[in-house]
Amino acid sequence: MLSLTIVKNVVKVNYYRDSVQLLHLSQQARQIDGIIDAAVVMATSTNKEMLASLNLLAQEGKVATSNDMIIALSANSTDAIDSGVRKIEELFTMSDQTREIRYRSVNEAVRSLPGANLALISTPGDHARELVLSALDNGLNVHLFSDHVPQHVELEIKEYARSKGLLIMGPGAGSAIIRGKAVGFANAVHRGNVGIVAAAGTGLQEVSVLVNDVGLGVSEALGAGGGDVKEEIGGISVLQEIEVLERDQETQIIVVVSKPPDQPVRTKILDYVCSTAVKPIVACFLGSEDYEVPIEGRGRVRLTRTLHGAVREIIKLTNSTCDPKLLAMDPTSLQSVAEQNWKNLVQSQRYLRGLFTGGTLAYEALVILDGLVGDVHSNSPLKKWLKLPNAFASYKDSIIDLGEEEFTAGRPHPMIDPTLRNMRLLTEARDPEVALIMMDVMLGYGSNPDPAGIMIDSIRKAQQLSKDSGRVLPILAHVCGTDQDPQKRANQEAKLLDVGVSLFPTNALMVAAAALIARRGEIRLPLERFYEEYLNEA
Amino acid sequence: MEKILDLFNSELKVVNVGLELFSDELKVQRVKVVHVVWQPLPRLEKEYEDILSKIL
């Protein structure tokens, strides 16, 4: 007898739980006896599309709005559905009861924590303003994780903070390390004398991890949010942060990481670091454009195009005795690793694909590929005309930033929930034109507890799909993390090596290898020149 | 500037608003943190919205 699958949506109107709590509830709901599939999500359009693709969207869910929550289940009987709904409701009650005391307002929370000095705010961006103002009025510095804060609000709150002698890191600031503690998405790194200012979240992570890898350490690492270096904002947070690190006694060298600032902001930053600051400074404005360092800063202020290059310059400026091999695969060994990967490709496999969870790492990839292979398509491209019309479908050489809005509205960031990347990996593997897939694996506090482990099934399936079509599919990865991180880098790397993934010590080296593989060694720049100009390996 | 430097020179104490995950991760690192539960304002019935828009 045929058994029909029943799909039911229960809509809870004006009911809110954060996306990470809902991810955990969804995982628990799938384990309930008699339930075929389940998801508990806020009713955003992205989530409704995802429910539809999983055959979990019913009529009730279709008409729900983004303030509502959908409990979506499928089962073979109405009894199983009803029992499943009851158990999910119980899970809600249990998760609320096991929590410690929680507060309803910033004012109330501050009263309960004398000496509070930082507010970490991660609500949807259009609700952030009042919370930030309340935090500032209570004398707190603010780490504003929320994105999509309107620019006029960003300017208003930053000017207000500055007038009170306070700092706002963000909006859109993913990471910070304060007194050795990881705030938001950040890694456990050794303490030391390198201070980091980053208007680029995973840029902060990569630099702090590489600094750790070469045997140095981080004094403080402060996020600023990508919008800070726009002309309208004028680099308010970046300049405050450089100034405060100039005054911090632990910090002996400062690295500033950002996508290319608008020209007036770049001038302002360079003028400040050259004329007013006195500590050695590395400015990594990701990109291929060459800037001139004002004469007062020459020698003390260094510019780099990549995150890898920034750490190279830090090593030079600190006269560090650390082993440079920790960071480098020399051109010969990189070429050799690439050749091992390209020698078994079939002729149709011509294009590279990058599936990134870290936005800055995706951007660094685009910068490097612009120099090595030319035009690369992306949902967040270097040039407007290279924007993919549909972020869910790659075209020729493509780099996908899975942290962009189209993938994250109402969902946890892919560094927490890599489901969409796992699905995309299989889509790419089916494409006969794909020569390789490269991925970042982000470790640290805030990230998935086992990001490599959770990809293994999909990696195996992707490899099998290619094999079934008579191809091999090289998969490249860079694990951005340390052995002190909760996930332990060595464990994560071992899992990836076990399924034949090629690993690289930096994102930049992985991307260069990808270019070599896709082009069978025929890249636009001689490899030695790439090392010199992009990696500062002179 | 002193209030910013205070972040580096005093114990880090955090008021977390939004993702509860961040509270949990700070607690693991033995950072003192209190959590503020945030919820969007409930959506009003259209009838009430219309009345409010007329009188406000």
Image (tube, rainbow, N blue to C red):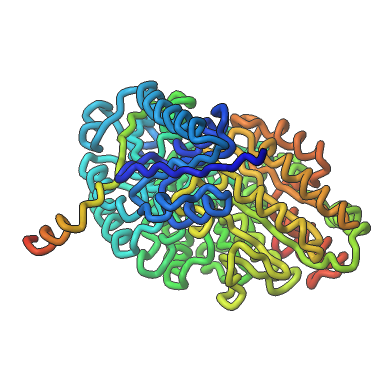
User: Residue A122 appears in which quarter of the rendering?
Assistant: top left
Q: Nearer the viewer, residue A267 or B27?
A: B27
Quadrant including the N terminus of chain A: top right
Q: Nearer the viewer, residue A355 or A51?
A: A51
Image coordinates of residue A437 in percent, x first then y, are 75, 55
Residue at the image point whose x is 56% and y is 56% from the top: A359
Residue A372 versus residue A318 in the image, above or below: below
Residue that sits furthest to the front in the current view: A1
Q: Indicate left or right for A229 with A350 as reference.
A: left
Image coordinates of residue A531 in percent, x first then y, are 76, 60
Residue A443 seen anywhere in this rendered image of the structure: yes
Residue that sits furthest to the right in the current view: A343
Residue A535 versus residue A289 in the image, above or below: above
Residue at the image point whose x is 31% and y is 45% from the top: A13
Residue at the image point whose x is 42% and y is 27% from the top: B31
Q: Nearer the viewer, residue A450 or A143?
A: A450
Q: Indicate left or right for A471 with A120 as reference.
A: right
Image coordinates of residue A226 in percent, x first then y, are 46, 59
